[in-house]
Amino acid sequence: MVPDPSDKSKSFAFRFEMLPGSSSGTEQDSYIVRGRTLTAGYSCRVGRGDPVYYSEYSYSGYTWSSDIHSSASLTVSPDSAQHFTSESDSVSLSCEGNSTKWTARAFSTASVSWLDCSHWKTMTGSGCYMDTHSRRSKVYWCESDSGEFSNAVNITVQDGDMILLSPARPVTEGHSVSLSCKLKRRKFDSTVFFYHNEKVIQNDSRWELKISAVSKSDEGFYKCQHSGRESAQSWMSVQANRPKAELMADDRDIPVGGSVTLTCFVNPSSSGWKYFWYREEKTSEPLTSQLSAGPIRVSEGGVYWCRGVRGEPVNYTEYSDSVTIYKIISNKAVVTLQPNWSEVYRGERISLRCEIKDGGDTEWEYEWRTTSSEKPSDQNEHSITSVTGSHSGDYRCKGRKKHTQHSSTDWSDPIKLTVSDKPLPVLTVSSSWLSAGASVTLNCSIEDLSAGWKFYWYKTVPEPSGNFYYRAKQLPGSSSWTEQDSYIVHGQTHTARYMCRAGRGDPEYSTYDSEPKFVWSADIHSSASLTVSPNRAQHFTSDSVSLSCEGNSTDWRVMRSSPEGRYRSVCTTWGIMTGSTCIINTHSTSDTVYWCESGSGEFSNAVNITVQDGDMILLSLARPVTEGHSVSLSCKLRRRTFDSIVFFYHNEKVIQNDSRWELNISAVSKSDEGFYKCQHSGRESAQSWMSVQGE
């Protein structure tokens, strides 16, 4: 007989559960309950004939137990089995355990009546104050909303002058305990007698009885006496200092068609123990009426407990901690990543889903297991709005049928989530130097080649302010994006600085902007141009070289960079800027590209200037030569004159080898464009590009 909180029609509602082995009835009019240590209510009925005719249920009978267990327990405060009848003597009953809703009950041994808290006080949460206004002895206990009884406590309320203060709950063997006599209005002035099972065990002026180490022989009835007055007697229960059973399972999951082994043992190990096994609740009847001496195999999911027993009279261990076993079903759990990208980057939005194959309309509960430091909630979908490195790891999931708590799928295969740093695309250009009007192909590459990336293309222009900043402008035709990782710039004639980035997802996740790349143009235009003085592409160290900016602006900065477009810097860091002119410091060798940037946001033509500390340079024009015009290139020695053959090269091919130190081209054509250098007596100049522009 267990509490039935679902029946609201009665203050004392119970449901009947058949005891093991009696589902078909017994011929005997007696039944032995084995291994029971908790409070329980029992009832019986008889039947005969076919079909069976049943009698009414008998009145219920209780077996009270003072044993305390974690799922339902009653605490009395103050912790005493006796109290005075007094409004000031406030005694509270507190219910604790695996429930949020409780009812405190009482049974009067004098009137054989059943009461709940509402008959004498009001139940507040899990607590109730006792009725201490009438002289009565009652048994109190708690009933949980989940259908469990707590330990029972026998409390006596006295209207006399004297009570015995003794623990309401059991005392554990080996512990100390103190029992004391208490007078309502005055002090003790003569001998106080303490009785154990009606035998005097202490008689002197002390009003307190102390037992330093309680043993089972100290269990029994106690009372005290003083000046002809006597307290009621109370039972002091002594419980064994019991070892705790330990339960182990060789696996927590029962494979399809299989079973798992449960082993119960007592630590420290000693002989003679046998074991009761329980499923779902410790308060339920044992799984079998037969005690087991060794492991058992189970093929059903559930919460399992065990308890050891030995000896005569019986000595029990504490209950073991519970072990939850799941029965694996054939449905397969699968973890999927959305979007399904091979690599995930810090800051992206993703979802991990647990899908049950052939799950149908079944309602499922989910559990996740991960090696990451961020454990997903127990939902079928785990959304991460901004993924970080702490989310990296393996993810598995499984599903449990919602209304069959201990049936579970097996764990899914793991899916590995690797979170990388935000990517930096790499921009490459088909040519660093632009032939006037030619097309330039830009390529934007990222390490992750999975689908889904969109590409954005920009040209950067100088900010009008004096700061070293650029603003980005999207290139024509790419105002949205392109699916291709390349973009062709048609008809570019001026120096330009390009940049790209990539994005994917919804909402879109963007990479860093790429490092910018220059496409240099030697073409001169009126709005912004750079002039070199002297007008040549090569100079000796210590030569005086000036760079002048001209065009539609009064605000200029002269810039330089390596030919690859790295290490940009402004004139004020390596030269002297006066107005629109920069004087170059030529004390060290260099191979550098120079250009002007206007306050109105334009680039000038670019000039590649080489500074040499050797004995020989090639004197070639720093600016483009116009088709049809004449041009002269010459070899120059730092300290002496030519005394042997001078070689001139065009694109590594000798085009002149004689005593002349000058190469003259009377009418330049596009075929003359290219790299030139000269050579004399084993010495060689650097090579320089000569650009040829149309008329």
Image (spheres, rainbow, N blue to C red):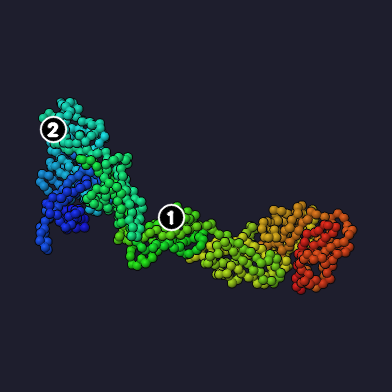
Residue located 80% across and 59% down the image:
685
Lower position in the chain sequence, tag 2 or tag 1: 2
Q: Is residue 350 above or below residue 103?
A: below
Residue located 16% across and 53% down the image:
12
Q: Which residue is mark 1?
A: 370
Q: Is residue 399 above or below residue 167?
A: below
Percent x, y of residue 13: 17, 55
Percent x, y of residue 405: 31, 58
Q: Quadrant of residue 230?
A: top left
For the image, the number of numbered tags is 2
Q: Indicate the amino acid at tag 1.
A: Thr
Q: Which residue is mark 2?
A: 198
Q: Quadrant of residue 169?
A: top left
- Badge 1 element: strand
Front in this rendered view, residue 257 or 241: 257
Percent x, y of residue 620: 80, 63
Residue located 63% across and 70% down the image:
488
